[in-house]
Every structure is written in C-alpha cells, then in structure tokens.
Image (cartoon, rainbow, N blue to C red):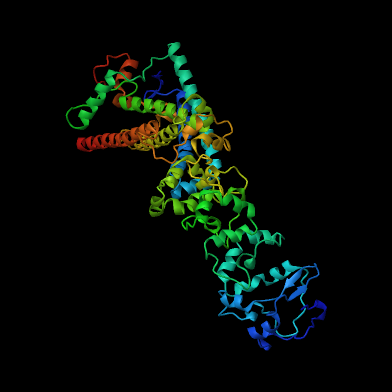
Amino acid sequence: MRIHLALLLVLLAGPASAAIPAEQDDCLGCHGSPGMTMDLPSGEKLPLFVDKATYAKSVHGDMLRCTDCHADVTGYPHQAKPFKNKRDVTVAFYEQCKKCHFANYTKTLDGVHFAVLAKGNRQAALCVDCHGAHAISRPSEPRTKISDTCAGCHKSVYDTYVRSIHGKALLAGNHDVPVCTDCHRAHDTADPREGALSLRTADICGRCHTNEKLMAKYKLSTKVVDTYLDDFHGMAATLQRGKEKGARLAPGCTDCHGVHDIQPAKDPQSTVVQANLVQTCRKCHPDANANFPGAWLSHYEPSWEKAPLVYAVVLFYKMIIPFMVVGIVLQIALHLWRVVVNR
Amino acid sequence: MSEHSGSGGFLVRFSLKQRIEHTATMLIFTGLCLTGLPQKFYTAGWAQAIIRTLGGIDATRWIHRFFGWALLISTVLHFVGAFGAIVSKKVGFNIVPNQQDFRDAITTLRYYLGLNDKPARFDRYDYKQKWEYWGLVVGNIIMITSGLILIYPTAASRVVPGQVIPAAKVAHSNEGLMAFLVITIWHIFNAHLNPDVFPFDTSIFTGKISRQRMEHEHPLELARLEGRPPGEHHS
C-alpha cells in the first residue's frame, strides 16, 4: 500500500486538544499492514508498518498510545509533512521523548552528540538511534547490547574494544567489565577529544580499579589511583582539569594504558609492559632513553623491594623533618623559658 | 668584615653585597614556597586557590622554575664571591663551624636549663646562625640538584639510573617543606620574636647593629674589633 504525499489533505487546523487521540487499533488499522511505506522526495521509502506484537512487548507497550509520541497526528487524513528524507523524520520526532524522559533529555544537551547536532551534523545520534522507536527494550539487557548499540556508528572503535581485555571478557559473559557507557556515559556523553576526558580517567577507571572486592577477584592492585595521584602526572592532571583545550595536558590512565585497546599490564601487546614502556614514555618524552622508564615505579609504593633509593629518601625525611622541627621548637621553648625565669 | 661606623652607637655588620644577597634570597625563597608548596599539597583548597590565582598549574610551574633558576644563579654567585674573598684573603672564613660552636651550643643549652649562670659568648656568628647558614647552603644544593633533575628528567636518566628521578622528587618535595618549616619557625623567631631583637632585627636590611647589641650578642667580635682581650666583659 502506498500513500503519496500529494494525496494527503490538510484537514484539521484546530487545536490538538479538540481532537480525540487515535487509539492503537485505529492507527494499526492502516499501519498494521506489513510493507506499508511512504515515498520520500529523497527517493527513500519510509516504513510505516508497526508490528503490534513487537510494540506490545516493548517497554512502552502497556502504557503509551500512538499519539502520546505522534502527538502531531490529530486525525485522518494526516496533515502533510515537509519531510525530504528519512533523517528529517527522525530529527522531527527527536523531542517527543522529553515529555516523559526530561532528565535524560537534559543530560543529552551536555553530550557530544548534541554538540555535533547543534553544529549541523544531522547524523549525530538521537534518542531513537540508540533506543529504537517501536521496539524499545531496556538498553542494558543483555549488557552486550550497549556496546552493540554504539557499534552501529562507532564500528572501528568497537572492533578495537572487543580485542581488549575488557571487550574480550564482556563477550565471554563477564559483567564486571566496562561497556562503552560506563566510561563515556550514556546521555551526557563526554567529548573524548582534546584530552579533557583523559584528565578524568583517574576517577573513571578508579571506580572499578579502587574497588577492593572487585579487584581481589582479579588479583589486581587497588593502589593504582593513589600512586598515580602521588606522582607528578597525577598532580598535574588533577590541576589541569577544566583548562582550555589544546594546551599540553598531563597524562591520565589511558595515555599510557591505551583506550579501547587496553591489555593486561603483563601482556606482550600491552603498551605498559616493560618491553614496550619506553615507546609509551616517548609519546610525551621524545628523547627518553632505555633508562627513563626506571623513573616510573609501576604503581608500586616505594619499598625496599620495589624502589630502595626512593624509599631510603622517604624514610630519611620521615625522620629528619620531625627531628628538626621538634629540635628547634624545643630550643625556642627553652630560650623563652630562660627569659621568663630570669625576669 | 665589620668595621667602626664612626658614629658612636652603631657598627656596620653587613656589607651592601650581603644585604642584597639576603633580600634576593628572601624574595626567591618566598616565591619558591608560594609556587612549590601548593604543588606538594595540591589536593588542599588553599593550594588550588593559590594555583588558580597564579593562572593555573602550568603558569605556577613556570614561575617556580623562574625562581629556581634565580636561586641557582644567586647560589653560584655567592659561592664564587665567597671563594674569591677567601683566595684573596680579604676575609677569614669565619662562618665555618668549629669545635667552639659545639661547646657554645652545649653551654647555651645548659644556660637555658639553668645549669650555667651565663650563656656562651659569641664571635661574629653564633652557632645558631652558622647552623642556619649551612642549612641553607646544603638545602640549596639539594633543591637545585633535585630541581634540575625534575626539569630535565630525560637528560638526567642518561647519566643516572631512572629511579633517581622519583627519589629527586621525594627529596625536592620534603627538603622544600623542611626549609619552609625551619625558616618560618626558627628564622622568624630569631629575627622577630626573640626578646633580644623583638619586634624586628633590622641589621640585615640597614647593615647596622647597635654597639649595645654587639656587646650582648657578639662580645668576642666586638672585643676583637676594639683591640681588647676577648675574655672579659666590657661596658
């Protein structure tokens, strides 16, 4: 069945409240016919068929009527719409979700997808691009659905991710590992470019990597964030937050460990395994020699076993600073006491 | 070094060069503490407020390095000057600690504790002043060396093992804190709160010291200058 735009008549010009919303059965009288499409000026065919069973199973199936979202449809024949292509249709309906999902809609305004859309890129992901329209189900059931969803546009990133330690574990059924939205967030997706996201990685990665219970399961250290923050890199990165983009930025976790291609630190492919470490240092310290990675204590706290020289200096000052301060305070106290006694 | 000022009540204690060196050191030390300590305690609110005021961490680091280079230059100039003065025998090296200083320290501490009647009598520099001077010299050497390693970590690792770099960071950070504590507690007490000089020992700025204070604080030097035997009190 084909309906030409030219055949659509402008019928109801009155306010929407005057009209009785169409019940699902009324709409599905036409839209329940498989294969129903509409030709668009771009030559694309807009599918107009809605499968009743699919919709009924969706999260909205038992609560929303067609016109709750398609609020512009106030009767039949429908009002003509100036859609030139399928993307026009998606963009036109994009703001329907916010009537109910206002909090998440507001978050999207801070997201990179909205920023890209605002710059005029109409391919930027909108609600239905990730969630679907009539077949909406919980976005994280199963958990792999999240990364599959992002892969719809970000295929090459997904291909890298599934080869990483996190991605491999996810596909093996592990639910502890992060999927895309755990790091990038879902609605207020941060712009990962220009380093701003990498400065926050101590928080992002730290959510799991400082979790004692979770890390014990994998025999991983939970000191990784504290040792990083004690180090020069962590200090500089913390203080560079909120800085103008483009300036030289201190490294976060991902600058050494990789982003989507993170491997276990002992894996031969890892960017931080001893054999590859000097190459990683050279990303920022181009004249680093083979000695240079020795400056990095591999997230260990200094100890006689791991960094005896550093530990010796730590201990020396742990003793000398209190000794000096107590010594001079004592001498001052004695001096003043003598002055008072002599009076 | 010291000479009669001519006017009865005052003697010249510090030359113009020494006064300039002190003022430069004071300014450099303040600049380094102001830009260095906030980096050590960077999670604290006051530290972040200072860094923000200075224009962010990158600006703070550049200012810190500027003062660091100034410290290096002033230290080298001081050593060159001191070396030249000794070689040309213009001065005795009277700031070198000797056995007498240890005896003086014990005598003074016993006096404070009430075991002696009188404190030690000092020459040009007493043991506390020598201790602070050499503390500054050793501290400057540690700070300058570790600071250079931290500015040029890749160059440093060509000459020394990599582990020296984090060790230099620990040393720089702690030595800096210790210098700050010693100066704020010790120096401010001795130059300001000490009842002998309260509220402000001006001699390092004016170069002058009263004869009365010389008799009290540096009797041996005064006796030497006036050609008297050092042993006795003189009034």
Residue A125 picture quarter: bottom right
**Residue B86, position in %: x, y?**
43, 14
- Residue B77, compared with residue A161, is above or below; it is above
Q: Is residue A60 visible?
A: no
Q: Is residue B221 visible?
A: yes
Viewer-proximal residue among B46 and A135? A135
**Residue at the extreme top:** B88
**Residue A97, position in %: x, y?**
61, 72
Viewer-proximal residue among A26 and A168? A168
Viewer-proximal residue among A245 and A1? A1
**Residue A271, position in %: x, y?**
53, 40
- Residue A169, compared with residue B82, is above or below; it is below
The image quadrant where one finds the N terminus of chain A is: bottom right
- Residue A304, compared with residue B83, is above or below; it is below
**Residue A218, position in %: x, y?**
41, 49
- Residue A84, compared with residue B168, is above or below; it is below
The image quadrant where one finds the C terminus of chain A is: top left
